[in-house]
């Protein structure tokens, strides 16, 4: 029972992280192995979280409010009647409770309390909407395609461990998107090279990596030509019907912040960690 509660608390914690927090990837990996009903529940929580953060990003604090609130204690001390220490000791509790305070002090406190309550309770109906989910059929089609390409072991146009050399070679093809190089967190994977290919007839660049006895393929392409939204929530797919031998594939699909590219990472184990960050290095 405690184990189940601990797991629920962990999922709940991850589901309330900001949209671009790396911890989100952990939850998205867990979603892929959940029953459909449970996955739908957590997807709903993620959607509400994204809407909340989008609304919070639109909140603007009035100019000077912070300075005004920080000056409150000093202003109270200046405007209150000066009382010597001996005089304080002579006051009864009843007298202390009725020391005159400028009228703006309780008014400011009330306004501040209302503002905080409103900020916490108001539903996130304003601001930019949360990114949409990737259509399941589109995600499945892309997953099958990139797994097939991964198993085909496409010839590397450039075999180099220097990411700058690889990105230069790929960019020379003048692909219809700005070619970028994503680097894995912690340098836990070794770059083997890269090349260009086609994903459902759309030009793509790819890099190949190795680490922990596994191979990784990372593809970049313009997904909009395949019905993929410019920006969408990260999707994690586990195509169990494509599993064989010790290859238990998982595919992570996401968009870059600019909406110019779609990324698809093929992992050979469903529990392998997605080590690629979301920031372009070059």
Image (cartoon, rainbow, N blue to C red):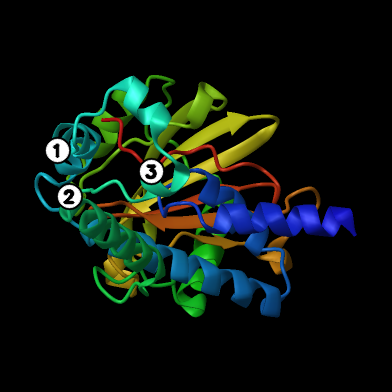
Quote the CA–CA distance across marks 1 and 2.
Answer: 7 Å
Camera-nearest residue between 117 and 87 = 87
Give coordinates of residue 31: x percent, y percent. Answer: 64, 63
Give the labeled residue for mark 1. Answer: 79
Residue at the image position 34 percent from the left and 66 percent from the top: 201
Q: Which residue is mark 3?
A: 96
Mark 2 to mark 3: distance in Å? 15 Å
**For the residue labelled by badge 1, is the local secondary structure a helix, a strand or a loop?**
helix
Q: Which mark is residue 179?
A: none
Assign the C terminus to one quadrant of the image. Answer: top left
The picture places residue 164, in percent across and down from the top left corner, at 30, 23
Number of numbered discs visible in the structure rendering: 3
Q: Which residue is mark 2?
A: 102
User: Residue at 61% of width from left, 38% of height from top?
Assistant: 215
Q: Is residue 61 visible?
A: no
- Of label 1 and label 2, which has the lower sequence position? 1
């Amino acid at each position: 029972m405690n184990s189940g509660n601990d797991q629920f608390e962990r999922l709940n914690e991850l589901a309330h992280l900001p949209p671009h927090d790396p911890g989100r990837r952990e939850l998205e990996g867990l979603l892929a192995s959940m029953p459909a009903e449970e996955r739908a529940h957590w997807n709903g929580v993620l959607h509400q979280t994204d809407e909340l953060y989008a609304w919070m990003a639109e909140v603007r604090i009035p100019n000077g409010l912070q300075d005004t609130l920080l000056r409150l204690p000093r202003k109270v001390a200046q405007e209150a009647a000066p009382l010597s220490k001996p005089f304080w000791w002579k006051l009864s509790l009843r007298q202390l409770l009725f020391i005159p305070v400028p009228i703006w002090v309780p008014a400011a406190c009330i306004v501040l309390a209302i503002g905080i309550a409103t900020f916490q309770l108001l539903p996130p109906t304003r601001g930019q909407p949360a990114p949409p989910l990737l259509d399941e059929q589109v995600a499945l089609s892309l997953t099958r395609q990139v797994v097939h390409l991964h198993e085909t072991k496409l010839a590397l146009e450039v075999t180099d461990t220097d990411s700058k050399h690889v990105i230069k070679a790929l960019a020379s093809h003048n692909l219809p998107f700005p070619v970028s190089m994503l680097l894995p967190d912690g340098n836990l994977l070794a770059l083997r090279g890269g090349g260009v290919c086609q994903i459902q007839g759309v030009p793509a660049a790819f890099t190949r990596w190795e680490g922990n006895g596994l191979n990784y393929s990372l593809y970049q392409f313009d997904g909009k030509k395949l019905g993929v939204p410019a920006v969408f929530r990260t999707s994690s797919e586990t195509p169990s019907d494509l599993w064989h031998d010790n290859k238990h594939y998982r595919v992570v699909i996401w968009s870059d912040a600019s909406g110019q590219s779609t990324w698809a990472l093929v992992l050979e184990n469903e529990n392998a960690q997605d080590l690629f960050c979301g920031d372009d290095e070059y």
